[in-house]
Image (spheres, rainbow, N blue to C red):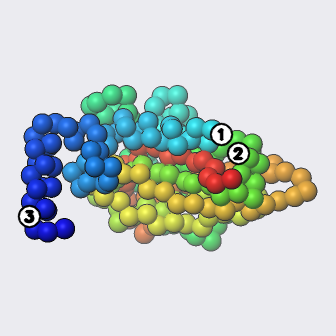
Amino acid sequence: MTRAGFLVVVAVVLALVAAGVLATTNFFGVDLPFFRPSEQQLVTRMTEAAAGGGYAVTFVEADAKKWHVGPGHQLEKFTLGQGDATFARLTSSTPLDESTWEWSTQGLSITFPVEFNNLTNGRTIEIGVVARLAQARPTDAISVAYATQQAGNSGWKKIPLGSEFELRKFTFDVPAIGPGTYTKEPILVIHADASGRGRGAEILGVYVKRVGP
């Protein structure tokens, strides 16, 4: 692009910002540094991602009882000033133990129905987490793991965060078992501070879904 063309694009963008057009839509169909979805839009995106047999879990009242907090971890819940979006601050004061399979002891966890293990048996799944750095004593990165609790796990994924809520995701190939079916519930675990120094992250929610054929 020529310098003149670049200046034209910049002028158009600035005009659209001034007019409020870019506040509600990504006009050019690309990621723009000043275009950030609201918390409510991110919750909607998680719910849509989980449609068709997946699961999305947030911290609204109906979901709150589904979460489990392991020893050495603390969870505080907050309501955002807009919409119904709710987030939680997770702080971890015990180091991450990557050698244990006692998944629920390693942080904040959520289990999914056994049926999801069987729906995704031998297939690829996507795990999404919407999170940001805590306002006070922020962590360097969160650690996330997904485990079938029967035939394999994703291992711990280190996920760096920013100052705004963002959707971060990774994929995992669920091991195929047969004959027979899965009999245990899969679990997703989040550890806020692998060093165990009491640093934290703020989480809006998570989802899991099958991807591909």
Q: Are marks 1 and 2 in contact (CB under 8 Å)?
A: yes
- Which residue bears the numbered disc 1? 53
Q: Position of residue 33 (x, y in %)?
A: 24, 55
Looking at the image, can residue 119 be seen?
yes
Which label's residue is closer to the chain start, 1 or 3? 3
Q: Say which mark, if any, is on residue 68.
A: none
Amino acid carrying label 3: it is: Ala
**Tag nearer the camera, 2 or 3:** 3
**Tag nearer the camera, 1 or 3:** 3
Q: Nearer the viewer, residue 199 or 16?
A: 16
**Helix, strand or loop at disc 1?**
loop
- Which residue bears the numbered disc 3? 4
- Say how many tags the image has: 3
Amino acid carrying label 2: it is: Phe
Q: Quadrant of the N terminus?
A: bottom left
**Residue at the farthest right position:** 179
Q: Position of residue 19 (x, y in %)?
A: 12, 36
Residue shown at 15%/42% (left/top)? 16
- Which residue bears the numbered disc 2? 116
Residue shown at 8%/64% (left/top)? 4
> In the figure, is residue 130 to the left or right of 18?
right
Q: Position of residue 116 (x, y in %)?
A: 70, 45
Q: Position of residue 27 (x, y in %)?
A: 27, 44
| Real-space CA distance between mark 2 and mark 3, rounded to the nearest whole angstrom | 54 Å
